[in-house]
Image (cartoon, rainbow, N blue to C red):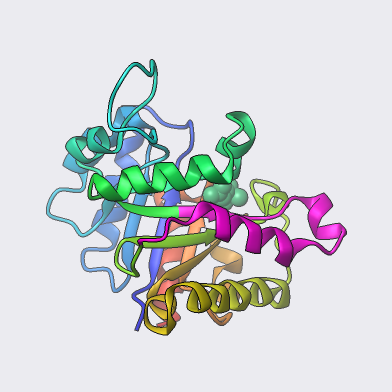
Amino acid sequence: MRRKLAAGNWKMNGVSTQLAEVEALCAAHPSPRVDLLIAPPATLISSMVVSAANHALEVAGQDCHGEKNGAHTGDISGEMLKDAGASYVILGHSERREDHSESDDDVRSKARAALAADLKVVICIGESLEEREAANTLEIIAGQLAGSLPDILTGENTVIAYEPIWAIGTGKVPTLAQIGEVHDFIRSKLQTRFGEGVGRSIRLLYGGSVKPSNASEIFNVSNVDGALVGGASLKAEDFSGIIKALEDAI
Ligand code: PGA
């Protein structure tokens, strides 16, 4: 059985005072029945690790470079994230694909580098509104999966987040049938490429405007193993509601 995962992505939000939210979250969920992960800005990784000491909550980076080290001003390597106490890194978020022109090839080499640094990866994929309206969603998803995933991965070290770009930060959510269609499609593609066992063991998160009020219905969709949450992960109370909904879906 795949263990469920509630992952928060703080994006470019939060200075040290924001860590009070993590402390409140840990206090509200002393022994969570699902995996918990938060990706703060890189400046808060090591202090968040301290805030979550003695708690199961894990900490993630939001990006890493595809090389181990070198002359890349402003970039962060997988080894650096690991050294700061992160155990995961989010890769290929649509905001990185857009703001930094990251291609599937870039995401794949970052994933290789992150896995080599012994990090687990959350690889994001998702279609734009134009692609959805042109009925190209599954084709786009297939292309992103083929291009962004390295050949060597396992259910232990890799999570995939399906995030329709038009649902991120907009309050718009696909229908449950649309979410289910894409998640089932991703599952079957993974089984074809990586074999039944590995394909079945990789966790699939849905992301895009997940809130406490819509989390339960989303978590009951087949092949949804949790969520990648942006805005609603910034407040302990909101993220807590989503975590409870996920625990109820076990
Ligand atoms: P949102 O962001 O929950 O604020 O829509 C999701 C994401 O970008 O991971």
Give me the residue at 38% from left, 66% from top. Answer: 5
135 falls in the magenta region:
yes
Give me the residue at 71% from left, 78% from top. Answer: 177
- In this view, which residue lies farthest toward the right? 134
Residue nearest the viewer, comparing 165 with 236: 165
- First to last magenta residue range: 123-152
Q: Is residue 28 visible?
A: yes
132 falls in the magenta region:
yes
Q: Position of residue 47 (x, y in %)?
A: 22, 34
Q: Is residue 234 visible?
A: no
Q: Position of residue 211 (x, y in %)?
A: 57, 59
The quarter of the image holding the N terminus is bottom left
Relative placement, left or right, of 238 versus 101 is left
The quarter holding residue 46 reads top left
Relative placement, left or right, of 180 versus 58 is right
Q: Position of residue 249 (x, y in %)?
A: 45, 81
Q: Position of residue 77 (x, y in %)?
A: 31, 32
The quarter holding residue 20 reads top left
The quarter holding residue 218 reads bottom right
Give me the residue at 14% from left, 48% from top. Answer: 53
Q: Relative to 211, does residue 88 appear above or below in the rendering?
A: above
Q: Relative to 189, does residue 208 appear above or below in the rendering?
A: above
- In this view, which residue lies farthest toward the left? 54
Q: Relative to 95, does residue 175 appear above or below in the rendering?
A: below
Residue nearest the viewer, comparing 139 with 201: 139
